[in-house]
Image (cartoon, coloured by chain):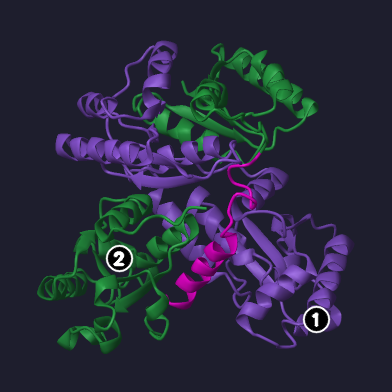
Chain colours: A purple, B green
């Protein structure tokens, strides 16, 4: 039977989710039902939340796990009455931090993912727009203002990676897809050559690539294993010839690919 | 002077960053220099990390704050020797969780953002592609498979919100922009009317909209306050007339907008 886990917050719930997911991932043999309950920011909502938790505990004959980032003491006290195993993130760490920093926590709600926290919020949206505007290799005139330019065959993971880096870190990521036509004589275009220090390659296992392309264009030459294998081989040769660092995306999530690229290129996240 | 905070992980660093940022956000009066150090997954890297932390402590005459999610005991022990104030996330919570779940943690590295954890990883990439493919209102034939369809004027935040929901939650979000031409006689198209339960509106303060549009097309009619005010007013009237829930995005981050929409529509996150 699945064990129920709640991620409860008076804000978006992202911190509670992220930490909770990380901890639960360490128990691979247990199946969890995961429920996020953001914006529990009033006495009434907290009381309803306690009822919901208690109902689950009774129905499943097992108290749920609750990860919470409630900041308000009144609401926290109400939740404390629920029949649950609580992983109380803020109360575990805020007091020690207050002592170390010799400062008082503001105990203010929803700070962590609020727009006020993100001074350069517009920068981040700009970065998303940058990724969207520089996604297909058609325009190269903005490469000067790019932080990074990803290279690779069609459908190897460039676009989601660029969007993730933009959204999460405000990094301006362009991407340049090598097309079938490029394969005849694969070279770096002048625009790419002029920005060589920004280039980073993505590659992928040909069978995986074929499966992904098949979803888009079933039974096409584009999706054939032979074509995929050919394109990947040619592009990897180019990366090696030109000394461009690259990563095989087959086994990695977008988060992992992004983190690895930032480490390899020595780019710091643009935190607020 | 800024206080230095490190987010250290043997994986992507996302969990350490997210929790660390949340906690630091409670100390609004202190400025922090934030450094993420992912993939600290060997004895050598850990030793180099300790040196780096100690160098900062000495240079700043103040020990750094270290948020870490190191799973491996050997690496954790090395880091423990650094001159830092440590917020040790896993060791604080894993033992109590083991007792509660009556199971042993696998103590395996990089589980939380790995592809293995995300059973429906492909679903998430599909969701990103869905958002990109259904971004401009030109195609409406996929609305049947959408989880949600965002409506609003150009540049009110639809695209970043759709992409965030796709990336973070695997939710298929389309968006439909009302154009200047639509304003003459603003109605829901048949495709929208057929999916009325999926519709959600975004609106924005006209002066903010004008500023955003001005970045794109300076001194255009499109970016004029009068035009922005007119479009926002017409679209809000439509939302009210049709009983479509909507949210004003001006004061909210993409994370907050997404979380609020999911709550209002009663959509659960698609967790792995």
User: Residue A243, located in which quarter of the rendered image?
Assistant: bottom right
User: Residue A235, located in which quarter of the rendered image?
Assistant: bottom right
| Percent of width and height locating residue B270 | 45, 57
Residue B259 lies, with reference to residue B111, above or below; the image says below
| Percent of width and height locating residue A155 | 66, 72
Of badges 1 and 2, the one in the foreground is 1
Taking A263 as reference, is A45 left or right?
left
Residue A127 lies, with reference to residue B231, above or below; the image says above
The answer for which chain carries disc 2 is: B
**Residue placed at 81% from the left, 71% from the top?**
A232
Taking B66 as reference, is A199 left or right?
right
| Percent of width and height locating residue B48 | 75, 24
Q: Can residue B134 be found in the magenta stretch?
A: yes
Taking A63 as reference, is B193 left or right?
left
Q: Give the residue number, with chain letter if any, for mark 2.
A: B156
Q: Which numbered circle lies on residue A227?
A: 1
From this viewpoint, is residue A107 visible? no
Q: From the image, which quarter does the C terminus of chain A lie in? A: top left
Q: Which residues are magenta?
A: B110-135
Q: CA distance from mark 1 to mark 2?
A: 41 Å
């Amino acid at each position: 039977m699945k064990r129920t886990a709640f991620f409860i917050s008076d804000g978006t719930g992202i911190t509670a989710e992220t930490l909770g997911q990380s901890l639960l991932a360490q128990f691979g043999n247990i199946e969890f039902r995961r429920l996020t309950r953001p914006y529990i920011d009033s006495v009434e909502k907290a009381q309803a939340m306690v009822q919901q938790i208690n109902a689950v505990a009774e129905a499943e004959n097992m108290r749920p796990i609750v990860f919470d980032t409630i900041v308000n003491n009144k609401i926290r006290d109400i939740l404390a009455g629920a029949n649950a195993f609580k992983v109380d993130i803020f109360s575990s760490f805020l007091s020690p931090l207050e002592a170390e920093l010799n400062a008082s926590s503001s105990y203010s709600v929803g700070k962590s993912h609020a727009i006020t926290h993100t001074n350069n919020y517009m920068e981040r949206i700009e970065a998303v727009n940058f990724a969207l505007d520089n996604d297909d290799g058609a325009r190269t005139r903005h490469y000067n203002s790019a932080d990074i330019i990803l290279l690779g065959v069609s459908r190897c993971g460039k676009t989601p990676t660029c969007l993730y880096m933009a959204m999460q870190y405000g990094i301006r990521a362009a991407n340049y897809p090598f097309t079938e036509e490029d394969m005849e004589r694969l070279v770096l275009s002048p625009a790419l050559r002029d920005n060589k220090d920004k280039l980073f390659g993505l590659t992928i296992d040909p069978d995986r690539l074929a499966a992904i392309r098949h979803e888009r264009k079933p039974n096409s030459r584009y999706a054939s294993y032979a074509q995929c294998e050919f394109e990947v081989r040619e592009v990897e040769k180019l990366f090696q010839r030109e000394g461009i660092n690259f990563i095989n995306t087959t086994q990695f999530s977008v988060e992992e690919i992004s983190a690895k690229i930032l480490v390899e290129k020595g780019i710091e996240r643009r935190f607020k």
